[in-house]
Image (cartoon, helix red, strand yellow):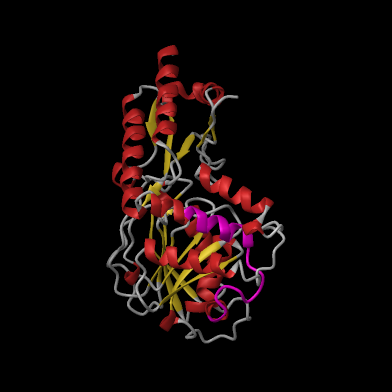
Amino acid sequence: KMKKYNFNAGPSMLPREVIENTAKQILDFNGSGLSLMEISHRAKDFQPVVDEAVSLFKELLDIPEGYSVIFLGGGASLQFMQIPANFLIKKAAYVNSGTWAKKAMKEAKHFGEVVEIASSSDANYTFYPQFEGKEPADADYLHITSNNTIYGTELRRDPDVKIPLIADMSSDIMSRPVDVSKYTAIYAGAQKNLSMAGVTVIIVKDDMLGKAPRELPTMIDYRTHVDKGSMFNTPPVVPIYTLMENLRWLKANGGVEAADKRAHERAEVLYAEIDRNKLFKGTVEEASRSLMNICFVMNDEYKDLEKPFLDFATERGMVGVKGHRSVGGFRASCYNAQTMEGVQALVKAMQDFEAQH
């Protein structure tokens, strides 16, 4: 069987041992004779899984006192609504850096005034817009999307702003150190760097909760889930287990500092080939290049080779290198589980294809 290299943008690759360990527990959880898929979330054996996942999360991101980590369903898309429901009092500021940022803005409009303080949409999102210092003093929070999966731009640092800061870190959380104290909330869908799809992680600053002027439905109020330790209702049991395994793997492999170093190393190899190879070109400004989603296209005079290259790469075992349907071209997602071997296999495919043409 041919070796596969998974560059899917999400759900994306997980470390093999994380998949295998989860699979074992799906067959028999902790020697109980029951599957992880069929145990009660109230079972005494499952609470330690949640506890360990929370404590590893806090340890790996060095989360200070006064913050809670909760696990919910619904993906980041539900958070687009839940964040403003909990934090928007009158007005919120948003940075429009891509498709998902735009979707987040749309949902926030249900709860109050939304101001777009910076955008790169006119330039087809080819750079991360500069926004620091543009935030209105009277806004309740500023919302940013740290990595833009579709366009391949990333803000790989924690900005300094004068109002509460909230970030969607779905696609780059746990790939670098983060100064959590700069944020009121951080949220992330799991299916990139954290776990399989089905669980969403939210980090919230406890003393910022409960200020919104509206009557919140029980499930929408973050305090419900903070108070009940993510067990108000049945949580996504298997994805939380996989999250715990993945965080164990990350810790054993040097934590977020080492993940950051590996991300830079992988991206440097791939961007260097994109810049060197006469067939291809990058799609975003160099300073904004994402380390997680590396987007590129055929050079104009080789446009007709797009499909042949995809076929060629697929024959070599590459999976998921087709760009998002809205932008075309190619996208190699290099999340934490991606290996240098995978990146080098893609580079070799690009070089061999160039030699043929």
Q: Quadrant of residue 55?
A: bottom left
In the image, residue 327 sits, relative to residue 1, either above or below, namely below
- Using the image as rendered, state which of residue 307 and residue 257 is in the foreground: 257
Residue 323 relative to residue 156: left or right = right
**Residue at x-position 41% and y-position 31%:** 341
- Residue 198 is situated, as x and y percent measured from the top left of the image, at 61, 58
**Residue at x-position 60% and y-position 24%:** 1
- Residue 166 is situated, as x and y percent measured from the top left of the image, at 41, 68
**Residue at x-position 57% and y-position 61%:** 240
Q: How many numbered discs?
A: 0
- Residue 115 is situated, as x and y percent measured from the top left of the image, at 43, 69
- Using the image as rendered, state which of residue 67 and residue 292 is in the foreground: 67
- Using the image as rendered, state which of residue 287 and residue 118 is in the foreground: 287
Q: Farthest front residue?
A: 31
| Residue 259, magenta (yes or no) | no
In the image, residue 186 sits, relative to residue 276, either above or below, namely below
Q: Is residue 11 visible?
A: no
- Residue 225 is situated, as x and y percent measured from the top left of the image, at 56, 76
Residue 292 relative to residue 34: left or right = left
Q: Quadrant of residue 335?
A: top left
Which residue range is magenta in the image? 227-246
In the image, residue 113 sits, relative to residue 253, either above or below, namely below
**Residue at x-position 34% and y-position 28%:** 273
Q: Is residue 23 visible?
A: yes
- Using the image as rendered, state which of residue 317 and residue 280 is in the foreground: 317
Residue 160 relative to residue 355: left or right = left
| Residue 232, magenta (yes or no) | yes
